Each structure stands twice: as structure tokens, then as C-alpha cells.
Image (spheres, helix red, strand yellow):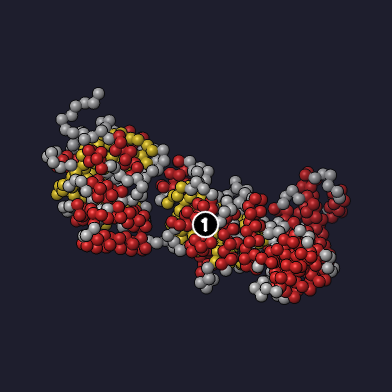
Amino acid sequence: MRTFHPRPLVSLVLPTRTRPAALRRAVESVLAQTYENIELIVVNDGGDSVDALLGELDKLGNILQVRLPQNRGVAAARNHGLRLARGEYVGFLDDDDTLDPTHVTTLVSALSNGTTRIAYANSRRQVEVPDGDDVVVQRIDDPCPEWSQDHGPDAFLIHNPLPVQAVMLHRSCLEECGSFDESLPVLEDWELWLRLSRNYAFFHVETTTSTVNWRPDGVTRRRGRDFLAAARRILARYAESANGRPDILAAQETLLASLERLAESHRPSVSVIVPFKSEGRAHVRGFLASLGESLTGTSCEIIALDRGLAPDAAAELVTAGVRSLQCDGTLAQGLAQATATARAPELALVRSDVLFESGWLNALRARAAATAGQPVIIGAKTLSPAGLVDHVGLEFRRIDGTARSLFRGVEANATELEFGGRIEATASGAVLVPLEIAKTVGFGSIDGWACIADLCLRARIYGIRTEFAPRSTVYRLPERRPTNWLTAEHNALLAVSAKAMHAAVHGADLVRARDELGRGNHAEAELFLEKAAANPSSSKEEIALLRAVEHLERGNCREAVEVLEQAFANGPEGYSASLSLGVAYLGLNRPANAWAVLEPLARRHPEDDVVVHELYRAGLAIGKWRELADALERYVATHPHDNEKRYALTSVSLRAGRTDAARAHYEHLRTTAPTLVGLDLLGRRLARAA
């Protein structure tokens, strides 16, 4: 049974989230009130537990704590507390502000005259500035002039004149007019005061009774765009009250202009977009720490795509000050959603399963800046935990559109990676995309991280190229497999996208010719090649390549070489041209020429079995034992179960004088493939070498 008290009950609602030190000060200021009949309702908005703290402070049993399962925002937290409130009068307090001991007594006295329903007192503003890991008080405005005036109903149409803790009201006001608008991420208190001011007068008590701790770099500045958007919504909602009032309309324009300047002055240079899905709380916390440390010195906003995080993991995003967007659709849809809200001119699309090397973002931006104003998509160099290349980019075979990964398995500091270069697409762990390109091209319909590669392909239609930056490095986490970023299904979809891109860039006739060659229909392919050759916009190099492929399939190696050498006077470009020319040289028994073409191609595609096979043929013919052993080592590192290539590596290593390496590979074969043909012969050769 509730104990009778001669003075009316006052309910104070205090939302909090993972700020225990500030919360202690706020709660202690409530417990120090001279007014006795108070219930304090602390709403933990999805933050860390404060049970121990409140248990220590609650000596009188007048603190009610409720913990929301996930962060819902300050408006929802206050409304939850209001639904639990039993008091005749209701007040509010943020967890970083404090009340003077006479605050409640002063406002209850003003409300007890029988006519006043809403009252407010003056507030002081304590301006704090960072000092290392601490803060120092720069000045105290006591009272703060703009919070310590008489405010009639017109004042609320112009700006928010009152901090939330300054106000106390009879609960019937909320029952009649409603509580805080939970659709507003900020300025929810102003909207409530404005709504109440249409029906009630606000009584001013000219006594200072509370303190607001204010920082120049605080939430208003960091979330300038949110404040501007919320202010526009609020003023539009109550536009009728300002009709015919040029003085109020002019003041509203001044307010919006000041918020626009504030938002623009804090516009970030880069919007970092990170999708999360099923990561645990510890992973999210560690990732954000790594990301934040790597971004030091760069003006960035971080946008998290929440695609199904558990509540405790999602709470970490709010703790870190990250803007979070709920995404129930595909990753491509989520990235489009985040792009629409991004405030920076550049997007950094980042996976949540990578770690960052210092300077990764600056290296991407420097590479983009070096393109003389031409828009470009830039991918980072993604390394495996062992420090080998996991991904720098993709090339696509012209005949079937198959995606080929570049340089996978090579050393991170390999000479061929030193200067970066143009690629057809990237699905790196970090990719820099100009905002306007992302908005114009879009992320397509391919799900998963492959939508980034699809974006690169479709951007080619707009004349936008893709490059990789050799000095921008991220690391794939150890527990992630290198193949789970681009699945076989992704590659099949990307092949379709690549063909569509080539059709748009080089013409549909060339694509039809490729398709017919892929089916073995040489006569039909020749018809489309002739049509393409008659089109001035068709790529002469593409036509030459397809004619060479046709010659090779007919066994006409000499004609293939002539066509390719004429078309690529400075050397072949791309996977298909280099491979075709290398195969043609081998067909003409010119292994040295084949090696010169295929060896750099094998460095770009160290895991490609076709390239490595043709290189092996050329290397055997001219005795390039050490170089061939290096190429086979790179291949076997990414294909440890290819016993035929390991057998070739063992043999070549022996010829290169690398006996220890040969013996190690031989022992591996004895364990994994003891019945492999020729293994006994290889063993005898090793015995003689010893």
C-alpha cells in the first residue's frame, strides 16, 4: 500500500546509456533535492548494466530502473518512463546534466497555485572543452540568457528556448496533448514544447535551478544534418501557426540558415559505410576500435548497415556514435539506402571482416586525387593473415566472362604491385567510390559483396575506370575463408554483367561474336565480326582478339600471332589477349616469346591453372627453372590439393637446385597421393640429388 504523503508526488524521468560517471552525478543531484516526495525513473536505453550503481545509491527505495532490450533513442526512452510514472507532476533530466537541490521545490511551488500547468526555471550553462582524456570548464553562463527569459507561444515557433530539465508540468497536459515524438531523432523536446504551447502557457520562475553541461563539439555540431532535417519537419508541421506573421517567418529562416551553416561546416570528407549482419558484440566492438584508430586525422562519418545484429551487438554501434540504418533487404539495397543518406562527397565501402593498416583511407584518396579530376573507383589491397595478396582486383575472360582474380597469393610487396594500376573491377575489403558515381550507377541487383564489382563493371559504361591503390592495405580476418566473398553464383552473375558492360562499351556485335565462338559456331562468329569491323565505334583490339581466338580454335597459330602482334604493337593487354598470344607462340614452337608474354600474366593471375599450365610448357622448353619454380610455388600456395602441379613443382625445384623445397613437396605427395604415377621416379631423382 502506498504511504500517504502531504506533498504531491513528482516523477522525474532520466534516460541513460553507458555513461556511468555522468549518471552518478545526475542521480546524486536528484537524491539531494530538498523536496521529499520524488520517484526517479531511470530508463537504461539498451546500454551496459547500471544495476550496481543504482543499487548503491538507492538508499530510500525511490529509484525505479527499467532497461530497454535495445537502443531506441531518447524520445522512446522518456516515453517509456512516462508510462511508468505515478506522479501528479512530471519532470525530466538528461544523464549529463544536474539539478540544484531546490529545483523540484521551486517548480512544485509554482505549479501549486491552481492555475499554472507548466512551469520552468532558469538554467546555467557550463561550457566544457576537452583536455586530453578529461574535460575542463571553460566558462559558466549563470544563468544562460536564452534559457532565462519569459517565453510566450510565439517564442516556441522560432527556436527551442528551453532545455528539457528546466520544465515541470502536470501529467494531465501530456494525457491531453501526447508525449515525445519518437520519429524525431533530435529536437523531440522542442516539438513537445511547441505542441504544448498551443494549449498552455509556460510560467517562468526567475530562479536558476539546474545546470546543463555543454561542449562546443557536442551532439548538435556532430549531428548538424539531423538537427536541420528535424527543424524543417517541425516548422512545416506548425506552419499554420506562423502564417501571416512575417516576423516569425523571417526568424524561422534565420534559424534554418544557421543550422545549414552548422551542418555544412561539419560535413565529413568521407562517408564510411559498413554492413553488419550476424557479428557478435565483441566483434563489432573490436572492429569499430580498429576502424576508428585507422581514421584518426580524417573527417569521416560512419554509417552502419544493420542487417540482423543481435540487440547487444547493435547497441555497440550507438555507444561508438555510429549512425545505424536498419536494412531488411539485400546488401545492394542497403548500400543504396546508406548512399542516399551519406553527407560526404566520397564513400568508403568497407567489409566488417577486415582489419586496417594505418593510412589505408588516405592512400585511397591520394590515388583518387592523382587522376587529375577524373572520377575513378579505387580498391585497397586486401591481404590474407599470412600477408599474401587475397584480392586486388578482377579481370574477365572475353569469351565466357569468367572472373579472374589478380595477384592472389603473391607477396604483398611484390614488384608488380608497386605502382597499382587499372583493373576491370574490384571486390576488395575497402573500396573508395565518388558519391555521385554511386548514385548515378547504383548497386544493381547482385546480392552480397559482388555488387561492388558489379558497380565497377556498370560504371565502365559511363567512362569510369577502376584502379587499385598498392599502398592502401586491409587484412582479411583469420577465421574468414578467402573464397567466401565471391561465390560461384556471384561469378556467374558477374559474367553476365561483364558481357553487358562489353556490349555497351564495345558494341553488341562483338558480344554476339564471343557467344558464337564459345559455342564453336565459327561461321556465325565471323558474320558478327564482319559487322563489328564495319562499325567505326567497335574496338579494333577486341575484334583482333576474337579473330585470334577463332584462328587458334582452327589450329592456325601463325595467323593468330599475326593478328595479335598487329593489333597490340606495344604488347598484349588483358588476360585473354596475353593468353591467346602465348598459346599461339607455343603452337609455332616459339617458347621464348611465349614465356615473355605468359610470365607477367602468371604474376597477375598466379592461381589460374590454364595460365600456369601454358607457362610450364614454355618454361620447360627454355629451361627457366627458378622462375618456373617461383610461379608454381605461388600456384600451389592457393591450390594445395592440386597434386599434379605439386609434382611438377617438385621436379622443377630439383632442376633449380632447390633440393630442400623439392624434398618437402615430395614428402607431402607421399602422404597425400602415395599412388601418384611417377612418384617413385621422383623419389629416385631426389636420392641421387642427395
Residues 537 and 105: in front is 537
Q: Is residue 356 left or right of residue 531?
A: left
Q: Is residue 632 left or right of residue 420?
A: right
- Quarter of the N terminus within the rendering: top left
Q: Residue at x 57, y 64 (%)?
A: 459
Q: Residue at x 75, y 60 (%)?
A: 518
Instruction: Report the number of numbered marks.
Output: 1
- Dividing the picture into quadrants, the one containing residue 115 is top left
Q: Is residue 480 left or right of residue 637?
A: left
Q: Residue at x 75, y 68 (%)?
A: 527
Q: Secondary structure at mark 1?
A: strand
Q: Is residue 305 left or right of residue 32?
A: right
Q: Position of residue 218 (x, y in %)?
A: 33, 54
Identify the residue position indicated by label 1 in the image: 349
Q: Position of residue 539 (x, y in %)?
A: 67, 71
Residues 178 and 143: in front is 178
- Dividing the picture into quadrants, the one containing residue 576 is bottom right
Q: Residue at x 77, y 44 (%)?
A: 672
Q: Position of residue 640 (x, y in %)?
A: 72, 50
Q: Position of residue 312 (x, y in %)?
A: 45, 41
Up the image or down, 323 lies above or below 344; here it is above
Amino acid type of the residue that numbered disc 1 sits on in the rendered structure? Leu
Up the image or down, 84 lies above or below 294; here it is above
